[in-house]
Image (cartoon, rainbow, N blue to C red):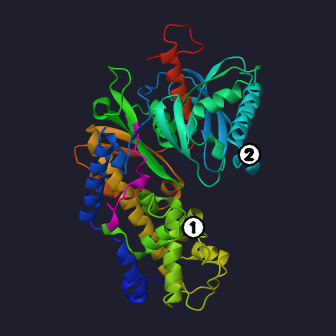
């Protein structure tokens, strides 16, 4: 028979700590309004450099209609792997993808920039030969998960890698040109690199082909980011072609809060996570909502409560004491048991050499996980509602890419609930899971860019607008 626990009565010390993670609706509205102010600054010419939501221009100014046809290439560059894709758009809502994952050797990832892009070019050359499209000069788009400074659709200066990459020679250089130069060494293939976009923009474009009302992309994984469609007249830094109406904006909102906007809602556990991270004082919003940071917050809380004897009092603390040891997969497993059941929670604790736990302690662990992930969903809702309210569109679809939304049993419901609560009721929205779509979006971006570049020439494919 399962036992139902009352947190306030059955584990009061845990309940007391978790109260620190319960923002009020007023708090969430305040965050939404702060976000709006930072976005306005990010889009402005005079205040852009001081904004913690810098709102980088993507230079993607066309949205797919679903009537585009043809085949295009994509290269996804992620922190943990790369993938090459051949994407064919045929009948309406029919996308065929063929892909190959590329495992980057550590020696290449940590080597010189030219080595890294030569490796990628070799992988692309092998792929197009396998698919027998090496002579077709197919357009290629890059979906890029690292920080760029964009100057044009096909010009992105690399600002930084994540810790998995050490190719310092590429920093400060144009990623598109590096790949073009590497591909030029292969005289037996013909591929045209058309542009580079971030993961959020790729997810937005990928869904937009099937659902033309898509206007936002949301990334919730090891990184936290968003992109949305803004009116060009709001983009004061844009100096491109006149008459264009739209611009996909890369919010880069992970840095929101870096200058103190979120200090009023941070608690001692948030500050400890930040202080012990590799980038103290930076990417504060991501440290509330990123999947890695949620697991680390739970670990910090559990370890503190173990030391005070509140839960798992007599158990070993050596494994739970290892930074970043509790990952998103473990967090989701803990909360996936039905009410009153703690089988998966115990399996996770077994990994930490904490065995034969009391149900009370496992219930407390589950409560901590729920509290941390619920707060993350609430804070993401503040950001999403801010973007919806800015666009003034009656109805939109939102492309969501991330395991925490897809696999966590309650995260999506909490995000939906608080986004509706914080959004002007005249604006309707729908979250749509878009697994593996950023490469599809990069491919369609490449196709649209190719159509714009060669709009007076015969094309190998049809872009039917």
Residue at point 77% right, 30% down?
126
Q: Is residue 376 above or below residue 193?
A: below
Is 17 one of the magenta-colored residues? no
Residue 333, disc: 1
C-beta proximity under 8 Å, tags 1 and 2? no
Residue on which disc 2 sits: 108
* Front-lying residue, 107 or 311: 107
Residue at point 61% right, 84% down?
317
Q: Is residue 88 above or below residue 351?
A: above
Check disc 2: other Cα within 10 Å, few if <14, some if 14-19, many if 20+: some
Q: Is residue 431 above or below residue 287?
A: above
Q: Is residue 310 above or below residue 40?
A: below
Report the predominant secondary structure element of the magenta stretch.
loop
Rendering coords of residue 123 (x, y %): 74, 35
Q: Is residue 371 left or right of residue 141?
A: left
Q: Is residue 350 left or right of residue 130?
A: left
Total tally of numbered discs in the picture: 2
Check disc 1: other Cα within 10 Å, few if <14, some if 14-19, many if 20+: many
Q: Which residues are magenta?
A: 249-263
Identify the image quadrant of the C terminus.
top left
Residue at point 43% right, 87% down?
11
Rendering coords of residue 75 (x, y %): 62, 35
Q: Earlier in the sequence, mark 1 or mark 2?
A: 2
Q: CA distance from mark 1 to mark 2?
A: 34 Å
Q: Secondary structure at mark 2?
A: helix
Rendering coords of residue 210 (x, y %): 47, 32
Q: Secondary structure at mark 1?
A: helix
Q: Quadrant of residue 113?
A: top right
Q: Quadrant of residue 215?
A: top left
Q: Is residue 411 visible?
A: no
């Amino acid at each position: 028979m399962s036992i139902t626990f009352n947190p306030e009565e059955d584990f009061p010390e845990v309940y007391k700590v978790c109260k620190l993670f319960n923002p009020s609706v007023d708090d969430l509205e305040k965050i939404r309004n702060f976000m709006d102010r930072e976005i306005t600054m990010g889009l402005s010419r005079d205040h852009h450099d001081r904004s913690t939501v810098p709102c980088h221009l993507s230079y993607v100014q066309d949205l797919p209609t679903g009537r585009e046809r043809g085949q295009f290439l994509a290269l996804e560059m992620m922190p943990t792997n790369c993938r090459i894709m051949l994407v064919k758009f045929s009948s309406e809502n029919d996308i065929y993808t063929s892909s190959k994952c590329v495992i980057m050797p550590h020696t290449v990832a940590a080597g010189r920039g030219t080595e890294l892009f030569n490796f990628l070019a070799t992988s692309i050359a092998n792929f197009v030969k396998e698919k027998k499209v090496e002579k077709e000069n197919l357009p290629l788009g890059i979906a890029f998960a690292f920080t760029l400074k964009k100057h044009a659709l096909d010009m992105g200066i690399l600002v930084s890698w994540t810790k998995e990459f050490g190719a310092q020679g590429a920093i400060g250089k144009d990623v598109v040109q590096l790949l073009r130069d590497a591909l030029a060494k292969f005289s037996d293939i013909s591929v045209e690199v058309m542009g580079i976009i971030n993961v959020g923009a790729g997810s937005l474009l990928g869904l937009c082909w099937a659902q033309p009302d898509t206007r936002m992309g949301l990334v919730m994984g090891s990184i936290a980011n968003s992109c949305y469609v803004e009116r060009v007249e709001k983009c004061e830094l844009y100096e491109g072609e006149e008459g264009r109406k739209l611009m996909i904006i890369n919010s880069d909102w992970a840095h929101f809060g870096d200058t103190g906007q979120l200090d009023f809602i941070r608690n001692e556990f948030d500050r400890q996570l930040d202080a012990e991270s590799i980038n103290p004082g930076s990417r504060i919003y991501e440290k509330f909502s990123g999947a890695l940071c949620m697991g680390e917050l739970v670990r910090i809380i559990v370890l503190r409560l173990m030391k005070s004897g509140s839960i798992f009092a007599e158990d070993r603390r050596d494994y739970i004491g290892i930074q970043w040891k509790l990952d998103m997969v473990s967090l989701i497993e803990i909360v996936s048991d039905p009410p009153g059941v703690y089988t998966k929670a115990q399996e996770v604790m077994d990994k930490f050499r904490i065995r034969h736990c009391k149900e009370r302690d496992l219930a407390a662990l589950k409560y901590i996980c729920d509290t941390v992930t619920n707060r993350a969903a609430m804070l993401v809702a503040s950001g999403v509602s801010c973007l919806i309210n800015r666009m003034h569109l009656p109805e939109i679809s939102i492309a969501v890419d991330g395991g925490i939304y897809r696999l966590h049993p309650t995260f999506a419901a909490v995000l939906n609930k608080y986004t509706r609560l914080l959004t002007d009721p005249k604006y309707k929205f729908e979250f749509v899971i878009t697994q593996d779509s950023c490469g599809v979006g990069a491919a369609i971006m490449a196709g649209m860019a190719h159509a714009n570049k060669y709009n007076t020439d015969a094309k190998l494919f049809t872009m039917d607008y």
